Amino acid sequence: MSHPIEPQGGSNPFLNAPVWRVFLSTAVPMAIVLSMSGVLNLVDGIFVGRFVGPEALAAVSLAFPAVMVMTALSTLVGGGMASLMARALGAGETSLARSTFVRAHGLALAVSAAFIAGGLVIGPALIRDLAAGNAGVEAMTRSYLLVLLIGLPVRLVLGLHADALRTEGRASLIAVLSMLLNLCNMAANWLLIVVLDFGVTGSALGTVASEAIGLALLVAIRLRGSREVPMRSLRQCNWWSGWREILVLGLPLCLGFIGLAVVSISVLGALRFLDGSDTGALVAAYGVVTRILGLAFLPQMAFALTAQTITGHNAGAGQTDRVRAGLTLSCAVAFLWCLAVTLVLLVARGPVAEMFSTDPAIIAGVGSILQPMMVFYPFAGPILVLALYYQALGQPGRTALLTLLKPWLLTPLLVLGAAHRLGSDGLWLAFPLADGILLALGAALLVRAGHTGRPANIAEEAR
């Protein structure tokens, strides 16, 4: 039986400070953190395309599905943990927040071990199939992914430490560290790719090294002092139990990222099926587009995670009005950001493509892909905010609907159908069609369900 939760005010700014101030102080540093990672990914693509060549750009494009799965695993652990921690801290349940933090460590290591084993067993065959007989692309893709695969445990633990600090309201600290580390990573990638000629392997080595340094710094910060969730909690709580709650809340967003990999595989498969003279250029162009939109997506994720944090704290404390205010503000900011991205990419798609390659076919391919993709793009951010809002309320079913339907069902089916009926030019029309359907569904869900701002029973969700 649930009882009314008394707000745990105290010094918790998520419960007391103006919502707009909380949003800015959380979203801006987080957007900087995530965007720096996206900028690094973009710079890597420029280095690879300019200094290694179009074949290398195609290789990292083939690796994109696997990279997205690794990102998905990070959200599985960190996202589920953050949702539970935010509501626990909002309700004053410090011991519950600590145990959740510790359990996430055990889950991260278990997930990493399973994925590494699976990748080593089935990865080579999958890469060989996607490379379609191109031995050079296959070799570069394998070496690139092997380095990232070995570094997966570092990535997952780094992600959950960053999510924990964000949930505790220390996002500005993460922003500063992220900027410094990513600048160092860019320098390392320049050294490894341009100077030492390590190719795509150098790009992966620079990424893993920066993640290891970042994790060491975050651990050092927590060792110096965290009142709510100190580092010594790792010795006091059980690592190997209580994973179900984290998985349930983290799974919808995780599957959403894996869905992006499914979409990528469907596009690559469709292009291989078409087997036209410009297929290689379109594969490279699609890789460029995924990097550009990947960077544009990261601030959206910051806005959505901020909404999740505000919702979790205030729903845990029973402050319904603040939950609604946070949702409205987050959706508005996400819409404006996506609208700005749409306008910039439609106007400057040519110059943007030229940063990655001087090949006219690749430049033309980027433009032909971007134009249809951006039709409903301004609404992508608000839909993501709404999905994480429902996650923070302990409603993973609605989160799953908004994050899984499009990448797992709508887009792959529409891509394959459009490719069969319309060829390579019409293939890209599948994306705005899927976006439009999801937009209608999200609007209907919000209107029909309403939003009271009350979470599921916190004791039951986080037990």
Image (cartoon, rainbow, N blue to C red):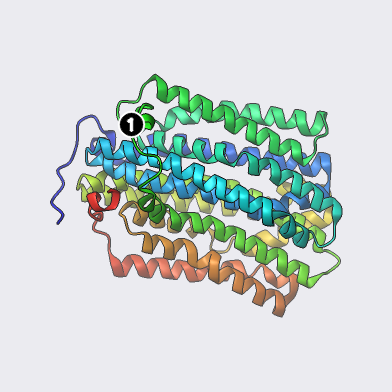
Q: Position of residue 29 (x, y in %)?
A: 46, 34
Q: In this orientation, does residue 297 appear? A: no
Q: In this orientation, does residue 300 appear? A: yes
Q: Position of residue 271 (x, y in %)?
A: 75, 67
Q: Is residue 155 above or below residue 460?
A: above
Horizontal side of 110 relative to 415 (left or right) equals left
Residue drawn at (58%, 33%), measured in percent from left and top?
A: 211
Residue toward you, 374 or 71: 71
- Quadrant position of the N terminus in the picture: bottom left
Residue drawn at (72%, 69%), measured in percent from left and top?
A: 270
Residue toward you, 49 or 347: 49
Residue drawn at (25%, 40%), measured in percent from left and top?
A: 90
Local crowd at mark 1 within 10 Å, few (<14), some, or many (≥20)? few
Q: How many marks?
A: 1
The single residue placed furthest to the top in the displayed view is 224
Q: Position of residue 347 (x, y in %)?
A: 66, 53
- Tell me the residue that label 1 is attached to: 236
Residue drawn at (75%, 31%), measured in percent from left and top?
A: 190
Residue toward you, 60 or 304: 60
Horizontal side of 94 relative to 294 (left or right) equals left
Q: Position of residue 299 (x, y in %)?
A: 50, 44
| Element under disc 1 | helix
Three-letter amino acid code at the position of disc 1:
Gln
